[in-house]
Amino acid sequence: MTCLKTVTAILLIGLAFSGAVCNAFGQAAIWNPHTRKQQEKYDNSPAYIYRLETSPRMISPYGVFISYQVNVDANGMNIIGDAANECTISVDPTNGNHMAIGWRQFNSVTSNFRQGGYGYTTDGGIHWTFPGVLENNVFRSDPVTNSDETGTFFYLSLLQTFCENMYRSTNGGQSWTELQADGLAGGGDKQWFTIDKTNGPGHGFQYQSSDGIDCDNSGVVEFQRSTDGGVTWQAPIAIPPLNDSPTDGTLDVDTNGNLFVGGEGFSAFYCVRSSNAQFGGQTPTFDQVTTVNMGGELSGGGINPAGLDGMLFLAIDRSGGPTNNNIYMLASVVPPGRSTTDVMFVRSTDGGLTFSAPVRVNDDPVNPSKWHWFGTFSVAPNGRLDAVWHDTRNAANNTDSQLFYSYSTDAGVTWAPNVAVSVAFNPFEGYPNQSKIGDYITIVSDATGGNVAYAATFNFNPNRGQHEEDVYYVRVFPGGIGATPTPTATPTPTATPTATATPTVTPTATPTPTSTPRPTPTPRPMPTPRPRPTPAPRP
């Protein structure tokens, strides 16, 4: 970890800042995520659950879109008193009915202790099973899931040491195998990873990047590669540019096997390429660094007091058509002169050498009081772009949020009219002793639509007199544009669950697969830290 005195000072500054400063809407003031972050740390012991109360799982329709609760118990019921957020989704490309979602699981809102929660579905997201957590009573955070082209799922999970584990599932996320001893997947906070799904020499390779709060204590923004399916990870390599490396962003691989990393440094957004990471016998190098104008900068706080208001998402078109290998980047950013966020998009049609001017995806009139946060997107196999985000445009209080959707069929030059796909929710309720609803949501697209995992506060907790954070799945699709009611009012869920006492249900039981499964790490040298300002840990 970073120097104890430095971390302590940063935390004290962060606590003083968040406790003393509020903006005009009564929210914590926004902050730059690169200069003032709280850390993923062990600060509460595992929560003792002496009993569990349940209520009916939440099914929340809005027009033609239906959100289904994911974090339900073994009987398909909502667990009263827990919390779940920061969710990532994987979809089996060989069977779209099979999906898995990973999230941060808080067994009690009275504790900040979080674990690696997960759920799976075999019927296209209508019913979900939450068998338990990856490792009971082990602190885990920042879940990232992904799938290879055969439908094997992977789950990368951050430990309190800022080291990680990679898990693998060959039965659609019903059960998971830990691929190495705790912490031996390297990495750091905030990690993202991608898989090479091309037919080139790097097929099956996994790549990850982090933000400088790393497992090896170097303070360097690092890249790592696995050439054996996530079992062992090679020595970390610093990501250029020096002293301004991209963080809080994702990675992807084009059809030629070139790896691209997107993110924001201290001064700008970047798209960085490695053309030789795909060759297992070579040490990866980064041979192209492009500065990207996203029309603003990433922020934290504000509508998500202790967390980020969004991350940078990079994805590449592998459709094989005229837009093949286009590189796209999207993020919720704070435009110049503003304190709230818009969803902005850019594209490159020349392999990341240059990028277009930023395009605003949210189509409501510019209003400095409105938030468009947690923006994320994905590219469908046919080249369509699907984007979702949380949006306050319909809220009189400028904070109640709805999930919104738009899509593009012309490589992001134009975007379809925005449409709300969920009822409104209060993002300030249900905090699990940590004032945020995670840092991101995710979407995976297919030929006809997108599969979304997001956190919202639809369920009411009668014991606390407020709503609670839960994970939801919703399918979005272009056919819903125009079929959804004009979102001018703040709707409510179809039912308000009533608590009923039930026998104790332990959501950590080992799952029994219901379908037939489909068919010593390398020591890492410690890199020399660069003369870069020490980053503060992220929440």
Image (spheres, grey):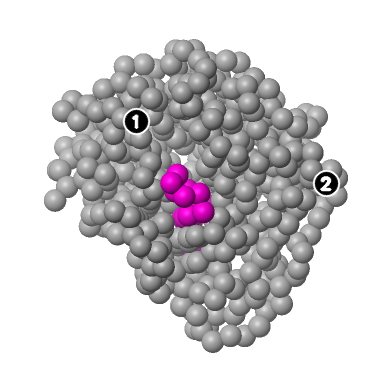
Q: Nearer the viewer, mark 1 or mark 2?
A: 1
Amino acid at the residue labelled 1? Thr
Relative vertical location of residue 59 with respect to residue 443 in this rendering, above or below: below
Q: Quadrant of residue 512?
A: bottom left
Mark toward the start of the polypeptide (1 vs 2): 1
Q: Quadrant of residue 228?
A: top left
- Residue tagged 1: 198
- Residue tagged 2: 485
Relative vertical location of residue 53 with respect to residue 440 in this rendering, above or below: below
Relative vertical location of residue 487 with respect to residue 51 in this rendering, above or below: above
Q: Position of residue 522 (x, y in %)?
A: 15, 43
The residue segment tinted magenta is 86-105
Residue at 57% of width from left, 47% of height from top? 451
Residue 433: within the magenta? Answer: no
CA gap, disc 1 and disc 2: 41 Å
User: Is 506 left, or right, of 79 in this rendering?
Assistant: left
Amino acid at the residue labelled 2? Pro
